[in-house]
Amino acid sequence: MIDSHCHLDHEPLLSDLTNVLQRSKDVGIEKLLTISTSLESFSRVKELVNRDEMIYGTIGIHPHESSTNIITANEIIDNLKNNKKIIGIGETGLDFYYNNSEKDKQIASFKEHIEASTKTNFPLIVHSRNAEDETFEILNQYKDKNIKILMHCFTGSKEFSEKLLSLNSYFSASGIITFKNSVDLQETFKSIPNENILIETDSPFLAPVPNRGKKNEPSFINFTASKLAEIKNISKKELIEITTNNFNKLFFN
């Protein structure tokens, strides 16, 4: 299995990393992608990718941080060149639910990340909350660039997923799909082609059932994989093969 989105630089994961990694290996995880959310976060990610061969990282500014963390496309590109285990751009995008940063700054930051992706062909990891129309409108402006888009922790509508599929997007399922009230989201993932799905924990957030309410960690991806296999009406073994192949195709081809 591959956890396509976790935050190993967040507590309680960071201070217990040795054990977190061992538990990840024990359940069969072969790669962890730890995600940058700010300039400070990226400095920790750069160190983490050297702690174990299974850890890879990204460079990006979360929309919540885009008012206080400014990064240009060229700065992103320079860091990608200098760090071979930094394999993605993000997480970036739009969050109009919390609006922790001004909308115009979120949009400007999002476009810098997209520009870096168009120039490097590195996958773009997108966060979108309460911003379906705006997110698609911006991404669609670059449709001729064939950006590699990964919608992280996807919780959007079926209509949104169908629009994003026109851009050949990938969709990562988090522990949210295990929640009882996520029937619509489960139906949406049922409709997404198998060749477009990944799995993630977003740990230490969003622990899946039966650990909902606890601090999440990568090893809990086991429960998300089981649920997604059930939703897709395939074996867990097949689901793991599909999502692992999709991750490797997206990030290493």
Image (cartoon, rainbow, N blue to C red):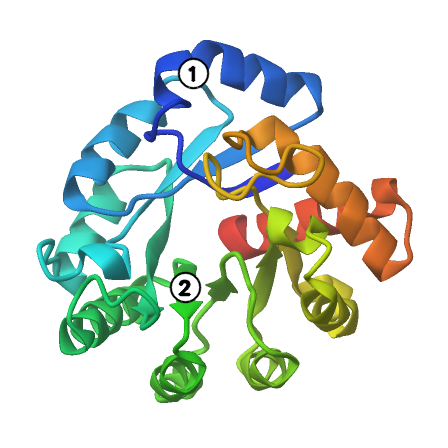
Q: Residue at x 68, y 52 (%)?
A: 179
Q: Nearer the viewer, residue 38 or 216?
A: 216
**In front of the other: 93 or 50:** 93
Q: Tag on residue 17? A: 1
Residue 126 at x, y = what percent?
41, 63
Instruction: Residue at 47% x, 67% y: name it.
Output: 149
Q: Residues within 10 Å of mark 1 (few under 14, many from 20)?
A: some
Judged left or right of residue 172, residue 71 is left
Label 2 to label 1, Cα distance in Å?
A: 26 Å
Seen from the viewer's position, the closer of residues 205 and 45 is 205
Q: Is residue 101 rendered to the left or right of residue 36?
A: left
Could you tell me if residue 98 is visible in this image? yes
Q: Residues within 10 Å of mark 2 (few under 14, many from 20)?
A: many
Q: Which mark is residue 170?
A: none
The quarter of the displayed image where residue 65 is located: bottom left
- 174 vs 55: above or below: below
* Residue type beneath disc 1: Leu
In the picture, measured across the screen, residue 83 lies left or right of residue 108, that is: right
- Pick whichever of labels 2 and 1 is earlier in the sequence: 1
Counting from the top left corner in percent of width and height, residue 205 is at 47, 40
- Residue highlighted by disc 2: 126
> Looking at the rendering, in which quadrant would you find the N terminus?
top right
Query: Can I make out residue 1 in this image?
Result: no
Residue 70 left/right relative to 122: left
Q: Secondary structure at mark 2?
A: strand
Q: Position of residue 54 (x, y in %)?
A: 51, 26
> In which image quadrant can residue 30 be found?
top right
Name the quadrant containing residue 181.
bottom right
Q: Amino acid at mark 2?
A: Val
Which of the pair 232/122 is nearer the observer? 232
Q: Quadrant of the C terminus?
A: bottom right
